[in-house]
Amino acid sequence: MKIQNLLSLSTFFTTLLLQTQIFFSSSTPFQVPKSNSTKILVLPLKTQKIPNKLPFTHNITLTVSLAVGTPPQNVTMVLDTGSELSWLQCNTTRIDRPVFDPNKSLSYTPVSCSSPTCTTQTQDFSIPASCDSRNLCHAVLSYADASSSEGNLAFDNFTIAGSKFPGTIFGCMDSGYSSNSDEDSKTTGLMGMNRGSLSFISQMGFKKFAYCISGSDFSGILLFGESNFTWLLPLNYTPMIQISTPLPYFNRVAYTVQLEGIKVSEKLLPLPKSVFVPDHTGAGQTMVDSGTQFTFLLGPAYRALRNEFVNRTGNILRVLEDPNFVFEGAFDLCFRVPLNLTGLPKLPSVSLVFRGAEITVSGEQLLYRVPGEVRGNDSVHCFTFGNSDLLAIEAYIIGHHHQQNVWMEFDLERSRIGVAHVRCDLAGQRFGVRH
Ligand SMILES: *[C@@H]1O[C@H](CO)[C@@H](O)[C@H](O)[C@H]1NC(C)=O
Ligand SMILES: *[C@@H]1O[C@H](CO)[C@@H](O)[C@H](O)[C@H]1NC(C)=O
Ligand SMILES: *[C@@H]1O[C@H](CO)[C@@H](O)[C@H](O)[C@H]1NC(C)=O
Ligand SMILES: *[C@@H]1O[C@H](CO)[C@@H](O)[C@H](O)[C@H]1NC(C)=O
Ligand SMILES: *[C@@H]1O[C@H](CO)[C@@H](O)[C@H](O)[C@H]1NC(C)=O
Ligand SMILES: *[C@@H]1O[C@H](CO)[C@@H](O)[C@H](O)[C@H]1NC(C)=O
Ligand SMILES: *[C@@H]1O[C@H](CO)[C@@H](O)[C@H](O)[C@H]1NC(C)=O
Ligand SMILES: *[C@@H]1O[C@H](CO)[C@@H](O)[C@H](O)[C@H]1NC(C)=O
Ligand SMILES: *[C@@H]1O[C@H](CO)[C@@H](O)[C@H](O)[C@H]1NC(C)=O
Ligand SMILES: *[C@@H]1O[C@H](CO)[C@@H](O)[C@H](O)[C@H]1NC(C)=O
C-alpha cells in the first residue's frame, strides 16, 4: 500500500483520486514462496551482527538513500512496508525526477521472460508479468488512480551502508505515473518491504528489520538484522495475523496485526471487537504501512473515535464548520486554530490497542496543520485519523505519522511486530546516525 503524495489540498474526491496512489500489486491473495534461491542470502557475518543502519528522512514519505549499480549511482527510495516490488525510475529522458540509468551500470542485467524470476516469483502481482519485444520480463504496477508504472524486471548490485547486495531484483521503470508531488521529484523509486518473495527484505534474507522515526526533525533510522540492544526498552509484541485461505480483500503479504480497541485518554471506546476482525471476504484487516502517511480506520471505528474526540475537545478546539472541506478526501474532522496561538492546547491522547501491544498518539501528532489553509485569523488543523470508507479502502492502515517515536521491529522469523515508545532522535544518536 502506498497512499502518499497527498500533499496537495483536495476538497473534492475526484481530485483526490488523481493524487492518491495505492499499490494494488499486493492487494490480491498471495502465496508466499520462501526465497532461498538468491545469492544475497550469503551475507558477511559482520553485517548480520552489527545491523546496517541508514539515516532516513520523512516528510510525507519515508525515504532511504543508497547506491545501485557499477559504478554506484546514488538513489533515494521511499520505504514502503506495504508493497512488494522495489523499483527505480529508469527513463533517462525524464527531467522531473532523479533517475537510475541502467546503461551506465556494468552490473545491470535485465531479467529474461523465460527465467524463473519472471515466471514464478511474479505470480503475486495483480497484473501478470509479460514478455516484451526483446524477450525481457515486463512488469506493470497499477495504482488506484488507474495510472500505472511499467518497465523491466532487472538485477543489479545494491550497496547499503557499505554492504553489497548483488543481484537484487527490482523494476526498472520506463513510464511512470504523472504526479505533481514535490516528493516524487526528490525520489528515484520505492523500496518494497512487505512479506512477498520479491520484496527487498525477502531478497536480502534478513529475519528482522526495525525503524524509528523521529518526531522532531524529519529523521530516523532503519536497521536490517538483529536489533536487541540493552538500552532499548523491552518491546511489546503483537503477533502478525495470517489467514491461510486466499480471500479477495485480504492482503496476505502485508504486515497484518490485530487491532482490538481504541482508547481516548484512558477510555476504551465502546466498540465490539468484531469491528476489527477481517470478515469472510478478508475486508477489515489492520496493516502497518510505512508507505502511508496517516492512519485510516473503517467507518464504525472512525465515527466512534471522531465523536469521542470532538466531545473531549469541545471546550478547547473549534471545529471547522465546512462540510465541503475534507482534507485528502478522508479527513473530515478539522479545527480552526488561531494563528497567533503558539501551540496547540493540551489534547487527549488516542491509543491504538493491539493484541499484546499499544501505540499511543498524543499532542501535536494528533492534528496536522493543513499547509496554506487559513480561515480568517485561523489556521486549519485536521485530525490525523481518516475514514477508510471515504476512500473505499477495505482496511485499517496504520500510517507512519503515528509511528513517530515508536521503535517498530518487524520480526519475520517469529512473525510478530514489536513496539516501544522511545525518543527516536536519541536512538539515532546512539547508533551514531548523522543526517
Ligand atoms: C531452497 O534451498 C533448498 C536446499 O538448498 C533447495 O532444495 C530448494 O530448491 C531451494 N528453494 C528455492 C525456492 O530455491
Ligand atoms: C517538509 O515539507 C514542508 C512542507 O512542504 C517543507 O516546508 C519542509 O521544508 C520539508 N522538510 C524537509 C526536511 O524536507
Ligand atoms: C553518492 O553519495 C555518497 C555518500 O553520500 C557521496 O559521497 C557521493 O559523492 C555521492 N555521489 C554522487 C555521484 O552524487
Ligand atoms: C540505453 O541504451 C540503448 C541503446 O543505446 C537505448 O536504446 C536505450 O534507450 C538506453 N536506455 C536508457 C534508459 O537510456
Ligand atoms: C555484481 O555483484 C556480483 C556478485 O558479487 C559480482 O560477481 C559482480 O562482479 C558485480 N558486478 C560488477 C559489475 O561489479
Ligand atoms: C520516457 O519518458 C518520456 C517523457 O515522460 C516519454 O515520452 C517516453 O515515452 C518514456 N519512454 C518509455 C520507453 O516509456
Ligand atoms: C537477542 O536477545 C535474546 C534475548 O535476550 C537473546 O536470546 C538473543 O541471543 C539475542 N540476539 C542477539 C543477536 O544478540
Ligand atoms: C460530551 O458527552 C457528554 C456525555 O454524552 C455530554 O454530556 C457533553 O455535553 C458532551 N460534551 C461536548 C462538548 O459535546
Ligand atoms: C489572538 O488574537 C485574538 C484576536 O484575533 C485575541 O483576542 C487573542 O487575545 C490573541 N491571543 C493571543 C495569545 O495573542
Ligand atoms: C484578524 O485579527 C486582526 C487583529 O486582531 C483583526 O483586526 C481582524 O479583524 C481579524 N480578522 C478576522 C477575519 O477576524
Image (spheres, helix red, strand yellow):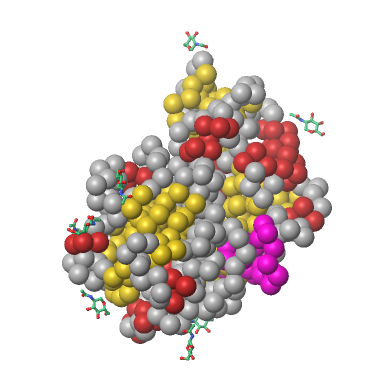
Question: Vertical placement of 23 versus 39: above or below?
Answer: above
Q: Is residue 414 visible?
A: yes
Q: Is residue 424 left or right of residue 47?
A: right
Q: Is residue 300 left or right of residue 211?
A: right
Residue 38 percent across, percent down from the top left: 40, 80
Q: Is residue 424 left or right of residue 289?
A: left
| Residue 426 vs residue 88, the one in the foreground | 88
**Ligand 8 appears in which quadrant?**
top right
| Residue at image coords 27%, 49% | 98
Q: Is residue 157 located in the magenta-colored stretch of the structure?
A: no
Q: Is residue 170 visible?
A: no
| Residue at image coords 62%, 41% | 391
Question: Vertical placement of 394 versus 109: above or below?
Answer: above
Residue 432 percent across, percent down from the top left: 32, 64
The stretch in magenta equals 231-257
Magenta residues: mostly which secondary structure? Answer: loop
Q: Quadrant of residue 44?
A: bottom left
Q: Is residue 256 located in the magenta-colored stretch of the structure?
A: yes
Residue 157 percent across, percent down from the top left: 28, 71
